Image: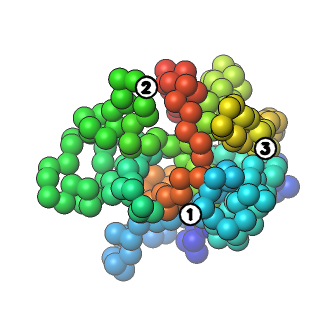
């Protein structure tokens, strides 16, 4: 949810009349109001947003078997399928968890550089980049790295902002959506209204739910208004920490991830 000094998410019915210039001016004015204020000690507090995850049947959360294939939102503890959202901005993250622990021993908020002061490196020098870390290396037999990658998307859902975490088999469908619906037409994320659903997949000894993305382009005026929200929230989102670990949220599929490794994300 937007804080008191940030704008509430603009409802779709209101955005059609909001032109790009008006949105930009509103954003710049709101930010300038707070310039020059004395520190109140909150600037070092890690920001956070509610998170949304695709539930797999193997999740350890209560009710996972009943709601497998649904999307769970952390602040309201509600399940959604379909999940109707507007995506605003995405980032790549990494996280390494020690066995049996649900908080990361090391994480990266950009998927490139480890965050400072991570427990894993308490008694040794941290690598300069995630690419140099031994925990990010895949095995010669194709075994996924111990440090997992995720795409985290800032979305508007039911009038509030949340972070949607996509990993494992969800990464492939999401990248296909980016490549076919956005990159090929040079459109931003916020140009589309998304309806996210899942489809059950299986192979011998394994069953999981995979992401499906249905996109509908919205009027340009609405897209520009949603884009204006990013001016307020992008910095907070880039610094936001990820959610606790649960092995059952996603089913890693190295073939899917490897297939799309060459598709870049904006």
Asked whether residue 208 is in view, the answer is yes
* Proximity of marks 2 and 1: CB atoms separated by less than 8 Å: no
Q: Could you say where residue 82 lies in the image, as x and y percent from the top left?
A: 82, 49
At 38% from the left and 50% from the top, the residue drawn is 96
Q: Which residue is mark 3?
A: 197
* Proximity of marks 3 and 1: CB atoms separated by less than 8 Å: no
Q: Which residue is mark 2?
A: 142
Asked whether residue 153 is in view, the answer is no
Number of residues whose C-alpha sits closer than 10 Å to that of mark 2, classed few (under 14), some (14–19) or many (20 or more): few
Task: Give how far apart the Cα atoms at labels 2 and 1 are.
Answer: 34 Å
Q: Could you say where residue 258 lies in the image, as x and y percent from the top left?
A: 50, 24
The extreme bottom residue here reads 40
Q: Could you say where residue 241 lies in the image, as x and y percent from the top left?
A: 45, 59
Q: Quadrant of residue 135?
A: top left
The extreme right residue here reads 13
- In primary-sequence order, the first of circles 3 and 1 is 1
The extreme front residue here reads 205
Q: Is residue 265 above or below residue 262?
A: below
Q: Quadrant of residue 203?
A: top right
Task: Give how far apart the Cα atoms at labels 2 and 3 are.
Answer: 29 Å
Judged from the image, the secondary structure of the residue bearing numbered disc 3 is strand
> Which dot marks residue 49?
1
> Does residue 97 appear to the left or right of 185 in the view shown?
left
Q: Is residue 18 above or below residue 260?
A: below
| Closer mark to the observer between disc 2 and disc 1 | 2
Judged from the image, the secondary structure of the residue bearing numbered disc 1 is loop
At 69% from the left and 52% from the top, the residue drawn is 57
Judged from the image, the secondary structure of the residue bearing numbered disc 2 is loop
Q: Could you say where residue 157 lies in the image, as x and y percent from the top left?
A: 73, 57
Give the number of callouts: 3
At 73% from the left and 57% from the top, the residue drawn is 65
Task: Give how far apart the Cα atoms at labels 3 and 1 are.
Answer: 22 Å
């Amino acid at each position: 949810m937007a804080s008191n000094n940030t704008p509430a998410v603009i409802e779709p019915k209101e955005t059609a009349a909001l032109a790009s210039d008006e949105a930009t001016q509103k954003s710049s004015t709101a930010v300038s109001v707070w310039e020059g204020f004395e520190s109140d000690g909150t600037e070092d507090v890690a920001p956070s947003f509610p998170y949304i995850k695709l539930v797999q049947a193997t999740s350890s959360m209560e009710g996972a078997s009943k709601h497998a294939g649904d999307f769970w939102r952390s602040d309201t503890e509600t399940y959604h399928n379909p999940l109707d959202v507007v995506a605003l901005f995405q980032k790549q993250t990494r996280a390494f968890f020690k066995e049996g622990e649900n908080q990361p021993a090391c994480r990266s908020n950009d998927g490139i550089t480890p965050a400072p002061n991570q427990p894993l490196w308490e008694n040794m020098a941290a690598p300069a980049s995630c690419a140099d870390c031994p925990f990010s290396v895949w095995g010669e037999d194709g075994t996924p790295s111990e440090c997992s990658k995720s795409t985290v998307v800032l979305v508007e859902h039911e009038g509030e902002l949340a972070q949607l975490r996509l990993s494992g088999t969800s990464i492939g469908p999401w990248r296909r959506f980016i490549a076919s619906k956005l990159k090929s037409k040079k459109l931003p994320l916020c140009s589309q209204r998304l309806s996210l659903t899942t489809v059950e997949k299986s192979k011998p000894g394994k069953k999981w739910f995979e992401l499906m993305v249905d996109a509908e382009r919205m009027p340009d005026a609405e897209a520009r208004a949603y884009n204006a929200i990013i001016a307020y929230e992008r910095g907070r989102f880039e610094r936001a920490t990820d959610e606790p670990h649960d092995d059952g949220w996603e089913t890693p599929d190295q073939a899917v991830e490897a297939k799309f490794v060459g598709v870049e994300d904006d």
